[in-house]
Amino acid sequence: MALSDYSYDLPKDRIADRPAEPRDTSRLFAYDTKTDTITLDVFANVARYIPAGSLLVLNDTKVVPARLELTKKTGGKVIILFLFNEWDRGPVIKGLPDRGIAAGDMLYADGRAIVEAVSNEREEFSFRLKILPAEFERLCEERGRTPLPPYIHSGMNESEIRERYQTTFAARPASVAAPTASLHFTDRVFDSLKQKGVGQTAVTLHVGRGTFSPVTEAHASAGRLHAEPVSVGIEAAQLVRSSKEAGRAVIAAGTTVARTLESAADPIMKGEGYSGETAIFIQPPYDFKIVDALITNFHLPGTSLLMLLDAFMQGKGARKTWRELYERAIAEGFRFYSFGDVMLII
């Protein structure tokens, strides 16, 4: 695998700055690998393409307003992205500052010390920061900003962003990026899936900085990404196992769900829950043990998400490549990236 194999040219006007309104009016690009058929539709109709009796698996993580503006003792402003997904709720949290700070620096809000820089992890471009006040999380909730990807210039205010860069079923706060494939789901979609006999369950992967970042040569050679916390409850594991044993398709709503299920495949097939971390880097060739169909957005070039898509399509024996699908989507005017349209590979 060469990283250059996952580059492509995207016209700037294909990058979505705002989500579809309503959510489920985003466009759907459905590809059936068995028949080699492409169908263009809207996501509200996704139930038409998912086999009756399937099991839909969602990621119930919740994005936190993790980007906080603080002040140095000198008066200079520093914006820090706090990596809540890597935080064990102890006295130290990792953060990514937008400008230089040094170990020992105190950072303030309204004249009150909030965090102290402890050490610089240069290889990760992050700092370990000692949390000082007990109400740190409340301060982030009240004054923090949602960490939108840098390519989104939507003009939305923070209140709008908190609503739209969040799934309707988000339940477990810790992510610093949204599981974007699930941004399209609405009650109307869930109702239509239920009417078709599609079951539903949830797992958790708290999304971090690594999921949407470009893959480096170091990642490629190590075969690992940044570690992210994952959990699969016993009930979810048993539902997935029973679906697999009965020959019913397991539909992963997003690459985060796919990575979670594949990371926990062994305990899942024993009907056991799983809680831990995953740094799984799914790239061709890969034998998917759990996931039978994938709902996913259109991804940035050079990312592990695109490589996972490629591995999934190859594993399904698809006659078309991911590049052919992307070229068709670009030609058809589909919107790309986090607020963009959605693809179903089945």
Image (cartoon, rainbow, N blue to C red):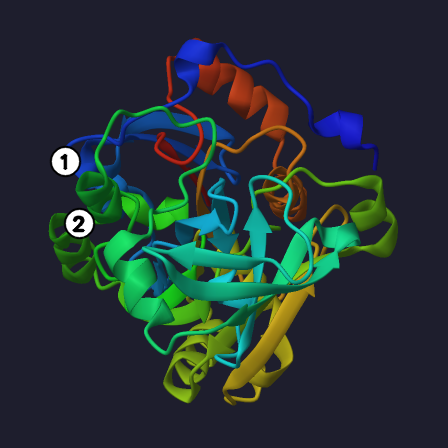
Asked whether, in this view, residue 232 is left or right of residue 146, the answer is: right
In the image, 135 versus 174, the foreground residue is: 135
Which residue is pictured at 20% across the width and 57% down the height?
196
Query: Compared to 83, does 178 lie above or below?
Result: above
Marks 1 and 2: CB-CB under 8 Å?
yes
Which residue is pictured at 33% across the width and 47% down the height?
145
Which labelled disc corresponds to residue 158? none
Say whether disc 1 or disc 2 marks the residue closer to the N-terminus. 1
Asked whether, in this view, residue 182 is left or right of residue 127, the answer is: left
Q: Residue 155: in sight, yes or no?
A: yes
Q: Residue 268: in sight, yes or no?
A: no
Query: Tag 1: Cα neighbours inside 10 Å, few (<14), some, or many (≥20)?
Result: few
Q: Quadrant of residue 165?
A: top left
Image position, residue 159 (x, y; %): 18, 44
Residue occupied by mark 1: 22
Query: Compared to 194, does 342 lie above or below?
Result: above
Q: Quadrant of the N terminus?
A: top right
Asked whether, in this view, residue 53 is left or right of residue 7, the answer is: left
Q: Secondary structure at mark 2?
A: loop
In the image, 242 versus 17, the foreground residue is: 17
Residue with the most extreme right position:
221
Residue occupied by mark 2: 186
In the image, 130 versus 172, the foreground residue is: 130
Three-letter code, disc 2: Thr
Q: Secondary structure at mark 1?
A: loop
Q: CA distance from mark 1 to mark 2?
A: 9 Å
Three-letter code, disc 1: Pro
